[in-house]
């Protein structure tokens, strides 16, 4: 099970991926989380990339490809993984297929209007990165993570101007990946424009797609 979940910032891909991973016994690899962890620990890559994240800009391809290549060498990825936030450029998409094979791309399809409303109400845990919001994922105690009890923060790249810039970049740099992969991978779309759809419902939709895809695949293998 080697999968990519692709979608604009705020499409719910991170939340869906973090729930899919334990359910399918695969690892969730979020390049955004990996970078934030490096920044927090002030590692050499964290120091080099801090400013890009703060400005909502992409980290240069060579740094991010190196980061993901090393992560995919770790043993826990042998059982499968779901990539969240990578690839984000055609160059990264090409490189990924040189590093590993991918069996499914899940494309989270959502309008800009919905995204802006979602991101402006988003909070995340300063320690474990778990995501909350003021509508559908409300923490039990205000401002505190349910799981690790650390404070919730607004990510510095979740301000309106930064969001708009990230959406422009997504349209120009990341969306063309769908076309690039069209004849290389199986692509399944998930439409997520309902603001009141809970993360649980989105997760269930993605899970159904994955399970349907796996059923089709195992039937194909039996038929061969
Ligand atoms: P995310 O948590 O996926 O929204 O990522 C947060 C930020 O990390 C992005 O706005 C970029 O600055 C950086 N980042 C994460 N993944 C990548 C990637 N594949 N390529 C370039 N920059 C990335």
Image (cartoon, rainbow, N blue to C red):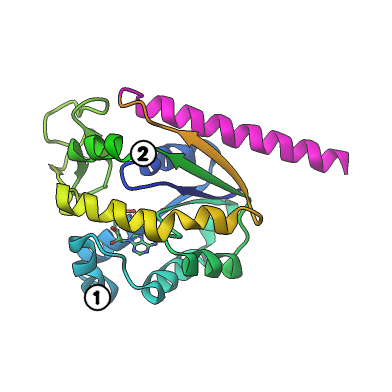
- Label 2: few (<14), some (14–19) or many (≥20) C-alpha neighbours in 10 Å: many
Q: In this view, does 29 lie to the left or right of 79?
A: left
Q: Which of marks 2 and 1 is in front?
A: 2
- Which residue lies at the image location 75% right of the left edge and 39% below the top edge? 218
- Which residue lies at the image location 57% right of the left edge and 69% below the top edge? 99
Secondary structure that dominates the magenta span: helix
The answer to if 95 sits in the magenta stretch is no
Return the residue at label 2. Answer: 12
Up-down relation of residue 30 to residue 68 (above or below): above
Residue 103, disc: none
- Which residue lies at the image location 31% right of the left edge and 65% below the top edge? 58
The answer to if 201 sits in the magenta stretch is yes
Q: Is residue 105 left or right of residue 157?
A: right
Bounds of the magenta segment? 196-224
**Which of the four quarters of the rendered structure image does ligand 1 lie in?**
bottom left
- Quadrant where the C terminus is found in the figure: top right
């Amino acid at each position: 099970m080697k999968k990519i979940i692709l979608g604009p910032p705020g499409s719910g891909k991170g939340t869906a991926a973090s729930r899919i991973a334990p359910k399918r016994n695969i690892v969730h690899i979020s390049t955004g989380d990996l970078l934030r962890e490096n920044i927090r620990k002030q590692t050499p890559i964290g120091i080099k990339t801090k400013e890009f994240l703060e400005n909502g800009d992409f980290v240069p391809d060579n740094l991010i490809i190196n980061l993901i290549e090393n992560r995919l060498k770790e043993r826990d990825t042998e059982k499968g993984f779901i990539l969240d936030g990578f690839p984000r450029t055609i160059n990264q998409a090409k490189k990924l297929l040189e590093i590993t094979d991918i069996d499914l791309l899940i494309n989270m399809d959502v309008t800009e209007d919905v995204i802006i409303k979602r991101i402006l109400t988003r909070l995340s845990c300063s320690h474990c990165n778990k995501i909350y919001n003021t509508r559908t994922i409300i923490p039990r105690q205000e401002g505190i993570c349910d799981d690790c009890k650390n404070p919730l923060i607004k990510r510095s790249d979740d301000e309106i101007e930064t969001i708009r810039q990230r959406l422009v970049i997504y349209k120009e740099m990341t969306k063309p990946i769908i076309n690039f992969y069209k004849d290389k991978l199986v692509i399944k779309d998930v439409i997520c424009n309902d603001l009141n759809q809970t993360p649980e419902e989105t997760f269930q939709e993605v899970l159904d797609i994955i399970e349907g895809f796996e059923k089709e695949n195992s039937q194909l293998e039996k038929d061969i």
